Amino acid sequence: VHAATPQPVHRRNLVIMDPDWIEQIEAYLAGDLTEPDLREFARQQNITSVEEDIEWVRDAHTAVAMAGVRKQLNRLQSPSSREAKVRKMTPWSRIMAIAAGFLLLIFFYVVYAQMDGSGTTYQTFAYEDPGIPIQMSQSPNYRLFDALTYYSEGDYEETILQLQELQSDLPENDTLQYFLGASLLYEDQPVAARRAFEPILNTENPRFAERIQWLYVLTYLRADEPQGARTALQPILAQENHAFHDRAQALTNALD
Amino acid sequence: MTSTSYPTSVTDQELYEGIEREDNRAFRFLYEQYQERIAAMVQRNSGNAEDASDIFQEGVLALWTNIHRGRFELTDSARISTYLYALCRNIWISRLRRRKPDVELRDDLLEDDIPDQTEAMLETHDRIQTIEARMQDLNESCRNLLNMFYHQKTALREIAQQLGVTEKSAKNKKYRCMQQLRSLCTAAT
């Protein structure tokens, strides 16, 4: 039910956007409402700032996402790494760093030479999901978000323990299943990871949908099951705009 | 642990796609490859290490904003490194002039080779940054809800479940938060 009074309402110099109007704009931006329909709604509500309001809603969506990306960048940059990045290295310390890097390379080469081929392939195509911004510690599901905090800190062992405890309380939670599967994979438990991913392989959650398919492929690589990896690659290869399509193609070539 | 860095031979297209999907490895690549150059530019021009770090982050966010909004087109002549440098340089000039209106800028900061899309990209970024700043005036519950819905793209069903309310209530609350944000933005102008 929409107010019959003209919109937007001006109150103490503030423009109050009607929630129904925001909903209509979002439906239009999502492609669920045509422009003529949106304009007809605006006409009925006496809304004259159509372009301005559309632009604002679009900007607001980006602003919310940008706040999330800013937090992501802040996490990437610890205070110590910030200083390290702007400090010029002396030529001598640069040489030492290169030498140390070279020795490390030799070390890893020797280690990997003793591993089977699939381990190397896994490392080449590995993908580490950084996790999601954790802001919900006050929510009713704070235990889930506590677990995801461990995940974002790279403590996968603790994440697994916490998420497994929560599974019976949240049996159909795709966030839980996804991060449980990812943690199991990073903890070198590929078969268990696959079991965690399987119930949500067809999730419609856009945040996870493509990543799950790729991590699912990696569970086969990690378990040295190239045939399974080839099969799991097919849904990714079938979608040219899939975020992991290029990597899937490269992996197919590597497996061949 | 898995590898967390892009190889140094990453293409601009791969980097573009990495930034678009907010892949930490793409962001790390930007920091590893370009931060030192930007820091040097800022520090040569009256800035300190903290300024350099802030400007670089703002430049990366401006780049992300425009990729996210489809406002930055990758072409043979539009390299990501060129644009990142131009964005950081312009952001620093703008901040420096606000801080010290009579500051004398060095020649390297006034090079006349600003790529075509830079001004429009900064304009978009500034507008969005203003809304982002107003978000800090929302209560935590609104910020969380908007973040889950518009950034994490969490399904409404899941958000409702996490909040312990019906989907309809979660949806109404989201629109009320948007309404509040619009009011805050309007009040600030």
Image: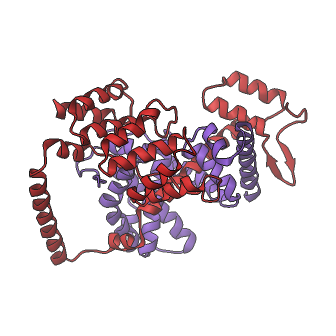
Colour of chain B in the rendered structure image: purple
**Chain coloured red in this rendering:** A
The quadrant the C terminus of chain B occupies is bottom right
Check the image and name the residue furthest to the right. A5
Left or right: B152, with A99 as reference point: right
Residue A34 appears in the rendering: yes
Quarter location, residue A53: top right
Q: Nearer the viewer, residue B5 or A163?
A: A163
> Residue placed at 54% from the left, 75% from the top?
B100
Q: Position of residue A143 (x, y in %)?
A: 56, 56
Question: Is residue B96 placed above or below B66 in the rendered structure?
Answer: below
The quadrant the N terminus of chain B occupies is bottom left
Q: Nearer the viewer, residue B37 or A121?
A: A121
Q: Position of residue B56 (x, y in %)?
A: 42, 62
> Residue placed at 52% from the left, 31% from the top?
A204
Question: Is residue A26 placed above or below B189 in the rendered structure?
Answer: above
> Residue placed at 24% from the left, 50% from the top?
B7
Q: Position of residue B132 (x, y in %)?
A: 61, 55
> Residue placed at 38% from the left, 36% from the top?
A243
Q: Nearer the viewer, residue A160 or B104?
A: A160
Q: Position of residue A208 (x, y in %)?
A: 46, 39
Left or right: A65, with A201 as reference point: right
Left or right: A21, with A102 as reference point: right
